[in-house]
Amino acid sequence: MSGCPAVRVSIESTCEKQVQEVALDGTETYVPPLSMSQNLAKLAQRIDFSQGSDSEEEVIEGEPRDREWTKQEPEEEEGTVKFQPSLWPWDSVRNNLRSALTEMCVLHDVLSVVKEKKYMALDPVSQDLTASKTPQVFQLISKKKSLGTAAQLLLKGAEKLSKSVAENQENRRQRDFNSELLRLRSQWKLRKVGDKILGDLSYRSAGSLFPHHGTFEVLKNTDIDLDKNDLDGSISPDIGDLGTVALFRRPPKTKAGTQQWHVKLEAAQNVLLCKEIFAQLSREAVQIKSQIPHIVVKNQIISQPFPGLQLSISLCHSTGEKKNHRASPEKPKPDDHLYVLEHNLHQMMREFHKQQLSSVVMPHPASAPFGHKRMRLAGPMAYDKAEIFSLQQNEGLLEKIIKQAKHIFLRSRTARTIDSLASRIEDPQIQAHWSNINDVYESSVKVLITSQGYEQICKSIQLQLNIGVEQIRVVHRDGRVVTLSHQEQELQDFLLSQMSQHQVHAVQQLAKVMGWHVLSFSNHVGLGPVESIGNASAVTVASPNGEYAISVRNGPESGCKVLVQFPRSQTKELPKSDVIQDAKWSHLRGPSKEVHWSRMEGRNFVYKMELLMAALTPCP
């Protein structure tokens, strides 16, 4: 190969810098070189500090180890310099004893210097006589000056802190005012008039025709109190108090204390609605012509739905801060506030607003009168005068609330009458099952009259009472309908007569179960004393073999009377007759004897009758 001509090979040096980015035009951007400190840190990261030196890991074994050290090659000694461990095994013990000896020597020297006076002498320092003779007054003055200086520093710091807190509060108040104003705008109608922000509390947008403006002004709260709202409202004083339309002159219960802006606005709007309701009721009370005229005095409307019953509708005001201390807790007043009618008044007023909002229809053509669209029809389908007059007739707010009050009073009277009879009369038992689904003008109750222990047998008396506005319709089990007035005594007399008839019906049903024969039955007996309440009822039953007969007469006032008729053969008191000589006439029943019913054992009437029938039934 030496004979061949030499060939020149060009070798390009490697790039010392690393390429970071190559641009679109081919320009290369290199990574800048490391500085000396960065290079040192990079090299330090390569050192493995977890590996120990050879001197700590290996154990010296005497002469053989010395021979190994002597046999090392000179090339290793010239290379990396390694730490040569000690050749004596007690080297560490010797080093520790040497350090302990050094410390003891130092301690001995210190003690000797302190103990012996020849090394160091402590001379007393002379005190300043003028400082000790300083009077106490000057000391107090100096202390006062120092305290004054410290106080000035603290006051300056407090002023700076108060200024910073005031600035933070102002910034926070500004933010809170804007957020509260945004929340207020989402719940109430607001408009800006000049430099004022006004709101609307009225129900004009919902169809109200009440002339009160119902406006309030939104103000910014300037009190430096973080617990209070940054929003305040200025409300008209005639609607600023809490108000409610109460019946029977009982003011509502309110909680004392400062209220939030939304609670105040809701209370003011409630007062505005109550004023509108009371104005509407007062207007109708003057216009309506009734047998007993309605009386309007200041904030009170007095009406008489039933004789002896008075309905009072009052507009009550309370600020929420005043407390009534006259009413003592020992003698509470009766709860005569009708919250149901109060709620119905608000509901009917809102329905009236809705009707006013939706009933106005623009006429076509424009010359036609306002009103319902069907009132402007022409031709054969048009309404006559009577039909148009019936469309225009509408019950007012006062008439509706009086009808609802009548129904509530009549229902309470009915419940009170049934409860008094159930608590006063134990036999028979009367049960009332009120319906949960009722109308504002009609309610229903199912009345069951039963005897204890015989509920499956005695099911004859089941009444359905439909309580209306001025009368009560009673529907019997067989479909008969009886109409009762609003008088409480009339309903009581009717229930008493039904309870009296129940006893006779129970005897009839019991006779069928016991195997006795029913000879006669009547709900209205024409013989005997006349009952002032209803009519007496009677039933006559005979034993299975026909020897004995039991006659029962029951009246609402006279009570129960039971007679037993025995066979003629068992009657010894009968005189012998010359006319009746045949023996067959001896099988007829003789005269009747009254049973002392109060002395009979048994928990109720039907149980006593069962014992009597069992005693008179012959054994098989």
Image (cartoon, rainbow, N blue to C red):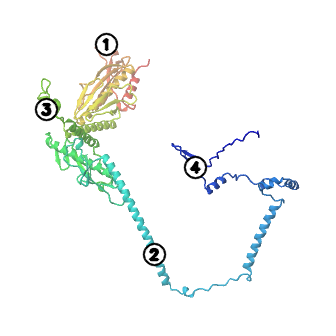
Which label's residue is closer to the chain start, 3 or 2? 2
Distance between the Cα atoms at labels 1 and 2? 146 Å
* Secondary element type, mark 2: helix
User: Residue at coordinates 34% horizontally, 12% vertically from top-left?
Assistant: 584
Which label's residue is closer to the chain start, 1 or 3? 3
What is the total number of numbered labels drawn onto the structure image? 4
Distance between the Cα atoms at labels 3 and 2? 93 Å
* Secondary element type, mark 1: loop
- The amino acid at mark 1 is Gln
**Is 174 situated above or below 504?**
below
* Secondary element type, mark 4: loop
Packing grade of label 1 (10 A; few <14, some 14-19, many >=20) is few
Distance between the Cα atoms at labels 4 and 1? 155 Å
> Pointer 4: what residue?
31
> Pointer 1: what residue?
581
> Pointer 3: what residue?
365
The picture places residue 498, in percent across and down from the top left corner, at 29, 29
Distance between the Cα atoms at labels 2 and 4? 62 Å
Q: Nearer the viewer, residue 502 or 186?
A: 186
The picture places residue 360, in percent across and down from the top left corner, at 18, 36
Which label's residue is closer to the chain start, 3 or 4? 4
Task: Give yes or no for contact between labels 3 and 2 (Cβ–Cβ under 8 Å).
Answer: no
